[in-house]
Image (spheres, grey):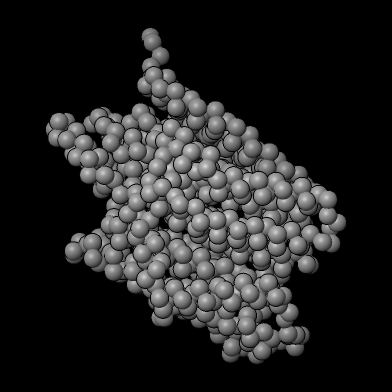
Amino acid sequence: MSGFSAIGLELAVVVGALAILMIGVCVSSERRSFLSYVAALFVGLVLLSSFLVSWPEKQAFFEGTYLVDGLALFFKRLFLVAAGFVLVMASGSSRETAIGVEFPVLVLIALAGMMFAASAGGFILLFVALELVTVTFYVLVAFARNTRRSLEAGVKFLIIGAVTSAFLVLGMAFVYGATGTMNFDELRVAPIDVGNKQLFDIGLVLVFVGVGFKLAAVPSQIWAPDVYEGAPAPVGAFLASGSKAVGLVLIVRVMNSTMLQGETLWAVLLAVSAVASILYGALCAIPQKDLKRLLGYSSIVTAGYLLIGLASGSEAGIGASLYYMTAYTFAALAVFTVVSIVFGASEPAEIVGLAGLYKRSPLLAVALTLSMISLAGIPPLAGFFGKFLLVKSAVGSAGLKTGLVVLIGVMVVGILISIYYYFGVIRAVYWVAPSKDGKSIIVTRSERVALIMLMVGLVWLGLFPGRLIRASSGAVGSIAPSRQAIAEVVKHDGERR
Amino acid sequence: MTVGLNHYLAVSGLLFCIGLAGVLFRRNLLVVYMCIEMMLAAASLALVAFSRFRGDLDGQVLALLVISVAAAEVAVGLALIVAVCRRGLKPTADELAGMKL
């Protein structure tokens, strides 16, 4: 496989984005909503073609900067699925709001950035791809620029995003200074002198801050509630699904390449960040009245759960994180789809406004209930199984180390608190009488199909998780360092002592 | 006195901290953007310094990319400020603090 066929999926997405831009310029503004459908169909085609191509097991292209392996493919497919649903959502909401021709184009460009990021083989591609995603999202978050909330969200997102990317660059500089390489494969076996160990550790912490911005993990979580509340609903959905997954895959890549030199550092860093994220998110979510803002806090909690899987350090733990990320993606997409149908894309989504939703539209009520139950982690849905896997991997790898016991304790507390606030939403849907003007809600055919697919996904992943577990553990297995690499580092450590 | 790696790193660290302080304490969005640029420039300086003293070009390549990405970021940021002004708001941090805990 040559380099240019290796980046074929990304190239297709970029070309598709440009083509849709060209078509959009020629189409009158009333007929723009069909562009989102076209983009969604196109994304579906790319997803399909990713299954038809036979990919190499593990291969590096372009001087080792671009990797094709199981992990990259797993995440690329996840991004494609998320982008498809986001585009369907946008096509529905373009009816009443001014979601113009640029919207599907920007979504596709962000998608291309995410797919490049999943394949990053070194810090250079990591940075460029991450910034492609982030800068595109600055525009997307402020897309409803005639509303003040969207503008405010955009400005906040930009400032915090730019500051954390400065941290990321400084961290990369330190790691580079300590090891002399930016390539992940070389980094894994790079010798670090005793004098440089501190520089390396500080560098890793800074990189974690920079990449944690995408994941919405403490300490760079502060943007999440405001941006989720202010951004248009489809953008919020993409932030919760694709953008969060980018953070996860990049942390996995960086962690995987520096695990041998920085094992204790990673364990402490991930555990502290996970505990702080879960407690901060869960406690702040309790008094929220706006559903989108509630999801912002719930996304911080989710970042904490994902980090627990990584903190356990085992392949099973990382696989559990991948599984949970997929489950969360489906639930978050479903919730945001319901929000954008009930409230409109860029209006506030007060939970009170959901009163009597089951009378106004049973389908929306069922979809919202199922995704809330999945987010809360109640069997038999996907979210339950994801949390179960996370706890299981933590217990399995821990033996009985105290740190991981604390982690599991915090996770249980987080789950209990989250059941309270998720059920507040379900209560509003079924047990609060609708206000007088509660008319029934019109759901377009494509939105109905998307919601049903998401619900089937949630139930199916919960009842028959085997396939996804195999896929995620295969993805994690593909990045495991070779025995030879480990031996080399151990040998070098021995010489140093 | 010869200028060594540590001198460059000290300058870079100082610039970074000044930039961070500016982001935290200044209220005008334009000034905040400038401070962010300063942080990015500080980080690039560290990259170039490491690259020079290690005799490896990767760091300088990344520094070039950082500069171009920073330009893109500012372009979007200034567009946001224009959009804020068009709505009749002042581009300050206090004006854009509608959403709170």
* Residue occupying image coordinates x 46% and y 64%: A326
Q: Quadrant of the C terminus of chain A?
A: top left
Q: Is residue A486 above or below residue A85?
A: above
Residue A459 seen in the figure: yes
Q: Quadrant of residue B37?
A: top right
From the top left corner, tell me how far across and down residue A272 is, in percent: 34, 56
- In this view, the residue farthest toward the top is B1
* Residue occupying image coordinates x 57% and y 83%: A366
Tally of numbered discs: 0
Horizontal arrangement in the rendering, residue A258 relative to residue B98 (left or right): left
From the top left corner, tell me how far across and down residue A155 is, in percent: 65, 49
- Out of A6 and A307, give the one closest to the viewer: A6
Q: Is residue A28 above or below residue A282?
A: above
- Out of A178 and A64, give the one closest to the viewer: A64
From the top left corner, tell me how far across and down residue A83 is, in percent: 59, 59
Horizontal arrangement in the rendering, residue A476 relative to residue A77 (left or right): left
- Out of A140 and A19, give the one closest to the viewer: A19
Horizontal arrangement in the rendering, residue A384 relative to residue A4 (left or right): left
Residue A387 seen in the figure: no
* Residue occupying image coordinates x 42% and y 19%: B52
Horizontal arrangement in the rendering, residue A471 relative to residue A154 (left or right): left
From the top left corner, tell me how far across and down residue A402 is, in percent: 21, 62
Q: Is residue A182 above or below residue A268?
A: above
* Residue occupying image coordinates x 38% and y 46%: A58
Q: Quadrant of residue A475?
A: bottom left
